[in-house]
Image (tube, rainbow, N blue to C red):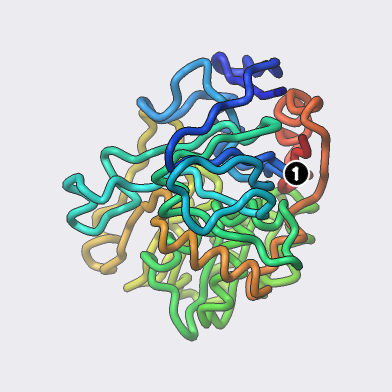
Amino acid sequence: MKAALLYGIRDLRLEEVEIPEVGPGEILVRVRAATTCGTDLKIYRRGYVGGIIKYPQPFGHEWAGDVVKVGEGVEGIEEGMRIRAGNSTPCYRCSMCRKGYYNLCENRTWLWGSYAEYVKVPAPIVKHNLQILPPHLSYAEAAITEPLACVLHGALKAGVKLGDTVAIIGAGPIGILHCQLAKRMGADKVIIGDMVEERLKVAEKWADVTVNVSEEDLTARVREETDGLGADVVIEAVGLPETWQKALELVSKGGTVLEFGGCPSGTKIEVDTQLLHYGEVTLLGTFHATPEEFTKAFNLISSGVIDVKPLITREVPLSEIKEVFDRILPSKRDLKVAIIP
């Protein structure tokens, strides 16, 4: 089969490799669509958190496809089923899992390699983080379950509630998913800022206010829209120290800042102690999601509560994977590209 392997920073190769053999509890799936993710682009351009990526690394983690082989002991899954599976599952035994922090599991089973014709799903993921697609749901839409699960995890931690004003930095796929979810959770007003007009045009479908930050200061606009108070919840969805820093300017007293986007390793921000102390501002970060949140995210998509179709702005064959990461995604005019093996 053809598969994309990452050998190092900006070193992505499409190669012929053996189709994996399945063992007990595992399944083999023919990938029908694998969507691109901002995390993939970060991994490609600057590497990733130590211990998660090991070169040469099978690449890609948002996908859906058809079951072609079922290992011994698998129940409820048959050949021909249309499924999607998560890119991880916790061990349920480590210290983090015992505290209920399943997204921070110390012995997580990871699944990478969806930019390929076939992918083997490990037994723990088959058991804990897999859903069967209803007939009306496309493969590419189902693939977006993974980022939405992470967004849901962050929104629940941030505590978006009825009547809130939410400010979002970044109108990429993550920012737009946060925008939709905030409105569904009862936010009265969502303000979203970005410097790419094409992305803001998509965000307009759900956001109450869009701000082109190359033309207008986001802090001033948020203060204007909130009678000088600031937003109840601020969500950073870019992943740069400067936008993490900017998020602190947008929050109201008693509000929450969710630093959602992952920054390069070793970077830092400064926090005004008065803001946290006298303003009682909550500053938090969130990472990944739990299997339960994956299931909820899948249900939000399959029921149509969250609309992910507008995020899929292009489809390309697997043969063009290098072009996608070298030219298409860096332009920021496309949101998600569906890779079709």
Residue situated in front as seen by the camera: 66 or 228 = 66
Check the image and report above or below for 48 versus 301: above
Residue situated in front as seen by the camera: 18 or 252 = 18
Quadrant position of residue 270: top left
In the picture, measured across the screen, residue 113 lies left or right of residue 210, that is: left
Q: Quadrant of the N terminus?
A: top right
The image position of residue 304, as x and y in percent, is 68, 73
Residue drawn at (70%, 49%) of the image: 195
Check the image and report above or below for 19 versus 26: above
The image position of residue 248, as x and y in percent, is 41, 56
The type of residue carrying mark 1 is: Ala
Q: Which residue is mark 1?
A: 338
The answer to whether residue 250 is seen in the rendering is no
**What kind of element bears circle 1?**
strand
The image position of residue 290, as x and y in percent, is 39, 56
Check the image and report above or below for 105 versus 134: above
In the picture, measured across the screen, residue 71 lies left or right of residue 32, that is: left
